[in-house]
Image (cartoon, grey):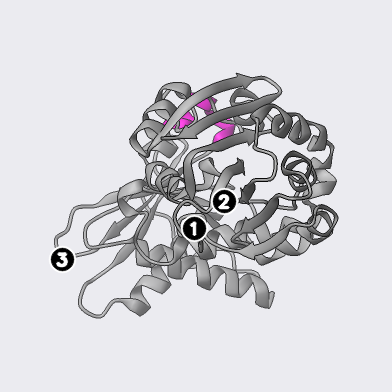
Amino acid sequence: MPTADISAAAPVPVDDSSQRRWAEMLGSLTALLPDGSRRVLVDGPADQASLFASRLGQRLTGEQRTRRVRVTLDAGEGSDVAIFLRTAPGGRHSPVYRKDGDDQDARDRREHEERADIVIDLHDTSWPVIRRVAVPLAARGPWYLTETRAFFACRAATWDAKFGDDLPAYCAAVAEAGISHSGVVFDVGCGTGRALPPLRQAVGPAGTVIALDVTPEMLDAARPAAQLAGASLVIADARALPFADGSADAIFAAGLVSHLPDTAAGLRELGRVTRPGGLLVLFHPSGRAALAARHGHSLSPDEPLAEGPLRGFTAASGWRLTAYDDAPHRFFAVARRQ
């Protein structure tokens, strides 16, 4: 098998914050790699695959004391670049690979991501992020908090400049959802707080609006909207909310589900803090097809927000799906707590 010289990898950027991000990402990644082999897709420039291989090899070599680890970059035929991990003497090789998006269609890209145990976003080589982890590995290590915060922290300041014109869509979704007046509503994964003014209007002055996000920078960006709406800001992980059972009359979650590593577990936690008969409103200001096209993906009937899987996930976690609309201009679904 022909191999590239990973010692010739491009140097890691010398900026201190970038160095810390690389170290943090590699720490999260190695914690996800148990004995045995795992397939990792590195999504980014093909000429940077050797950079990833080199850095991962150095990290693994430094951490392993009881087992051998070898990282090899394969520059063989076609557009695949494969990196192999051997995590035990005589262990089976499994590819840690990337596929160059210039030469494949969206279906190929989605299929490769679905086959991967872990997906690394290396489009910005100074700020690598673990973008996806397969459910069987999702509970391993601290990766979810560190990587989610890394992804959103650097985007918080410019988020509304890019997406601020979505506010009318948020207002329409909240108005249509039927959230109870004078109730308690949690905006889980609130981002920059675009839903907070319409949520305040829905519950009225006697109601309670609480905005939660796991990324401090997003909560800082949400502060003006929260002050305007009289909403409280709470830093919290959607997978373990700091509230008692049945605390909320409604949950509003815009773009949250696609970022949860385990959809069923996430919906169960949202159900735990919602009273019987309460609402779950899932929303995105773009439909699934438009969002997939924006990211160069194709739609799959097996995605968590596809109607069939979402009905299954909600039913299994104590919700009953009562509305589902995946239009070109928005995604909108409502479930009621059983």
Give percent across and percent down for residue 260: 48, 48
Query: Circle 3 — which element?
Result: loop
Q: Amino acid at mark 3?
A: Pro
Q: Which residue is mark 3?
A: 89
Magenta residues (range) = 101-111
Could you say which quadrant of the image residue 138 lies in? bottom left
Instruction: Answer whether labels 2 and 1 touch (C-beta < 8 Å).
Output: yes
Q: Is residue 75 visible?
A: no
Q: Amino acid at mark 1?
A: Ser
Q: Is residue 84 left or right of residue 13?
A: left
Query: Circle 2 — which element?
Result: helix
Mark number, residue 200: none
Q: Which residue is mark 2?
A: 47
Q: State the residue in front, 186 or 310.
A: 186
Image quarter in which the C terminus is found: top left
Q: Earlier in the sequence, mark 3 or mark 2?
A: 2
Prevalent SS, magenta region: helix
> Of discs 3 and 2, which sits in the foreground?
3
Give percent across and percent down for residue 46: 55, 47
Q: Is residue 297 magenta?
A: no
Q: Earlier in the sequence, mark 1 or mark 3?
A: 1
Q: Which residue is mark 1?
A: 50
